[in-house]
Image: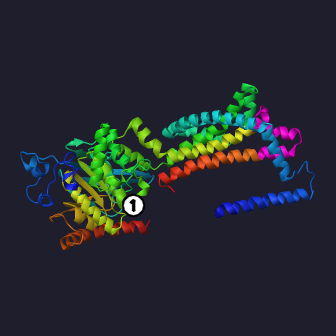
């Protein structure tokens, strides 16, 4: 409760300062809109359904691209972590590819797939696949060795050892990888949408720019922050906390 | 089910033998009474566990090899309770890993029932120092795990989980998760999980080292009781000589790096024993005098690194 009160006071003050600065007319309102202007843009956006459609389109792409990258990343991560050879070859490649910002995949995606849905999904996949893979690989390595030994000791081997011991033992790390993957996928998707201009929140943001409508730009930015935080902060962090409690890690 | 713990598990384990009888088993002509099978002669008995010239060394660096275990030979009779003591770093835990088949030795053979150990098997269950209980499973799930891996039918598993949890007095905690339990309770879960696979040999790696004195005393009593009820063979590693004298039929003392068997002590004291009993204390002192030299060596090695 105390924390909530602090946060309330903080955000009120932030908006208060913003309103004050807008009222002083230091900058023209089309460059520095007041909070109520942005509020209005948010209201209008939802009222004419353009924001709802944008959210729906973006979330649909997110779900498809992200599911693909988690599924592929888990397989890749497990593969890389279970073989010394793969770790030294493929593992090294993955780490170096990770230094490539996901927006750099866009030219390649456009040439391969054209300005299509597939190209956007490709960028999302490439943006988050690597981080999921690396997190999975790390997870397998960080997993306490004792569980594997205890499992073998109690008669588990082969697939059953993997399924009943190694997989659940690395679950906290898997969730961590999924969380990181989500953050990367989210960034990649918005970036891709800004360039592809085919519906979605990224396009709404660029439309604001094209119309010189600063209120809309800020409104969409707030929307992107809120959606990202909602999934990351509510879904993933809750999952992570629950797991850590159950596993006695926290 | 009967309320008395003594009468409630005959279906899973051999009928209880009285502690007094048990305590005398190895003083006279022991072995046939332990096995409860008429044997031709005492001398012909195959040791439950036999280590035959076991050595283990690691390549550490360019400098060369570290000899962890050096020519260890040891025979453990069926139903015997052997304690292995030694300073930290003498390779006593490694010895248990070798018997459990979790790690291969460099040379020599580990025989269980006269057959060489080729890998892990549920006839030998190791209770790790860190326990290695599975946090994603409930207490019941942990106890059930080994039976699940052996494809024991579900109904039988459920029944046995209850029986073994009763054996370690944890029936009420079947659906709890591991992090919700105290250290002593976790120890008992590990014990139940190990026993539920029906092992002949129980390998225990300093299982009570991290517990407070009261809990440890309590678990000593329980372990002694469970041992006498199940009739399994126990190899118990500890650095605590009093614990060794309290529990073991025999105390094997190991040297510090390389690990060798330095001395063996037979503990001819009646059971059930108590940690504070003067005879136990006297026995512990005898072992400790012999051990002190090795402890000094291990301390020297630590400080002159």
Residue A103, picture quadrant: top right
Q: Is residue A197 magenta?
A: yes
Q: Quadrant of residue A165?
A: top left
Element under disc 1: loop
Residue B55 shows in this picture = no
Along the viewing direction, whichever of A161 and A63 lies nearer the viewer: A63
Q: Residue furthest left?
A: B40
Coloring applied to the structure: rainbow
The residue nearer to you, when weighing A70 against A242, is A242
* Residue A25: x %, y % from top left: 93, 56
Q: Is residue A157 visible?
A: yes
Q: Picture coordinates of residue A76 (x, y %)?
A: 55, 36
Residue B286 vs A170, above or below: the answer is below
Q: Quick check: is A195 in the magenta stretch?
A: yes
Which span is picked out in magenta? A193-221
Q: Which residue is mark 1?
A: B182
Q: Residue at x 10, y 50 (%)?
A: B32
């Amino acid at each position: 409760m105390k924390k909530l009160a602090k946060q309330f006071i903080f955000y009120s003050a932030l908006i208060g300062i913003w309103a004050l600065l807008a009222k002083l007319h230091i900058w023209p309102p089309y460059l520095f809109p007041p909070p109520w202007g942005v509020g209005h843009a948010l209201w209008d956006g939802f009222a004419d359904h353009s924001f709802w459609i944008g959210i729906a389109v973006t979330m649909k792409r997110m779900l498809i691209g992200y599911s693909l990258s988690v599924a592929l990343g888990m397989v890749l991560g497990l593969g890389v972590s279970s073989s010394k050879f793969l770790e030294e070859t493929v593992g090294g490649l993955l780490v170096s590819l990770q230094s490539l910002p996901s927006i750099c995949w866009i030219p390649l995606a456009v040439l391969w797939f054209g300005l299509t849905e597939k190209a956007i999904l490709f960028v999302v996949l490439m943006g988050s696949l690597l981080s999921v893979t690396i997190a999975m690989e790390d997870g397998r390595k960080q997993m306490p060795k004792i569980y594997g030994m205890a499992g073998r000791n109690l008669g588990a081997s082969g697939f059953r050892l993997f399924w009943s011991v190694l997989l659940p033992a690395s679950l906290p790390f898997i969730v961590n990888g999924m969380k990181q993957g989500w953050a990367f996928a989210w960034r990649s998707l918005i970036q891709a949408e800004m360039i592809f201009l085919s519906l979605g929140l990224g396009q709404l943001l660029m439309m604001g720019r094209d119309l010189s409508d600063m209120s809309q730009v800020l409104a969409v930015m707030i929307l992107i922050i809120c959606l990202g935080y909602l999934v990351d902060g509510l879904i993933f962090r809750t999952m992570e906390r629950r797991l850590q409690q159950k596993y006695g890690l926290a | 089910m009967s309320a008395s713990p003594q009468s409630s598990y005959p279906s899973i384990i051999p009928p209880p033998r009285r502690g007094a009888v048990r305590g005398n088993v190895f003083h006279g002509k022991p072995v046939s009474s332990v096995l409860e099978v008429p044997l031709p002669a005492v001398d012909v008995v195959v040791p439950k566990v036999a280590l035959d010239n076991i050595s283990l060394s690691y390549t550490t660096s360019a400098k060369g090899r570290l000899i962890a275990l050096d020519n260890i030979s040891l025979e453990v009779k069926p139903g015997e309770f052997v304690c292995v003591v030694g300073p930290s770093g003498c390779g006593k835990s490694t010895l248990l890993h070798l018997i459990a088949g979790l790690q291969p030795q460099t040379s020599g053979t580990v025989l269980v029932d006269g057959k060489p150990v080729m890998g892990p098997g549920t006839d030998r269950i190791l209770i790790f120092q860190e326990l290695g209980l599975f946090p994603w499973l409930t207490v019941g799930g942990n106890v059930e795990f080994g039976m699940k891996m052996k494809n024991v039918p579900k109904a039988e598993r459920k029944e046995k989980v209850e029986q073994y949890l009763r054996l370690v007095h944890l029936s009420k905690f079947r659906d709890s998760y591991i992090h919700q339990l105290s250290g002593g309770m976790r120890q008992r879960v590990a014990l139940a999980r190990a026993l539920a696979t029906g092992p002949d040999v129980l390998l225990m790696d300093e299982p009570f080292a991290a517990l407070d004195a009261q809990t440890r005393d309590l678990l000593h009593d329980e372990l002694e009781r469970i041992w006498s009820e199940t009739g399994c063979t126990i190899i118990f590693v500890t650095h605590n000589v009093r614990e060794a004298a309290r529990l073991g039929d025999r105390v094997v003392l190991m040297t510090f790096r390389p690990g060798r068997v330095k001395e063996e002590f037979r503990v001819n004291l009646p059971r059930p024993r108590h940690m504070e009993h003067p005879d136990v204390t006297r026995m512990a002192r005898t072992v400790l005098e012999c051990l002190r030299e090795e402890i000094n060596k291990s301390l020297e090695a630590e400080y002159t690194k």
